[in-house]
Amino acid sequence: MAIDKFLWQQYSDPYFTFVHPLVFEEFAILTAWNPYSQWQSKVENDRSNHSLVEEFGHTYFSEVYVGDRNFSWVETSFAVVISEQHALYLGQKYKQNAIYYVINDELYLLSCLADQTKVYLGSYLQRCR
């Protein structure tokens, strides 16, 4: 199964607003909202995100809002210091189409589906608001 081209295009132009500044050079940005891009209520999304946060254990994380350029679309997400492999595992477990991964200001979009697509999106810092 591959991600719909329109959705992939939307995922490829993200912007981020952090609740707390992040000082790490390598981390994942993921959410449990709207599994497989199917709309869920805020209550359901919050419940799913709570379960996701419990997976982090004692690992450092920060809440981050991920949205389009104008933040007319936004999802509550988390920046968490975990490996790319663990981030993909969590993305799959929480039925996400894709996640973001940052290494030294380089932002990547990673498919959680069978195609395992990985695309470089440019500077992560230039997408922070």
Image (spheres, grey):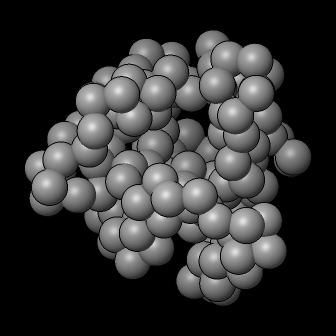
- Name the residue located 71 percent from the left edge and 40 percent from the top edge: 74
Q: Position of residue 102 (x, y in %)?
A: 47, 38
Residue nearest the viewer, comparing 97 with 107: 97
> Which quadrant would residue 89 be assigned to in this image?
bottom left
Instruction: Provide residue 93's location: percent of width, then percent of height.
Output: 39, 77
Q: Quadrant of residue 86?
A: bottom left
- Please say whether residue 68 is visible from this viewpoint: yes
Please, which residue is most extreme toward the right here? 19
Say if 21 sits above or below 126 in the image: below
Residue at 38% over, 49% down: 98
Nearer to the camera, 95 or 15: 95
| Residue closer to the observer: 5 or 120 | 5
- Residue 65 lies in quadrant: top right
Q: Residue at x 87, y 46 (%)?
A: 19
Which quadrant holds the C terminus?
top right
Whole-percent x, y for residue 71 in the image: 76, 27
**Quadrant for the N terminus in the image:** bottom left
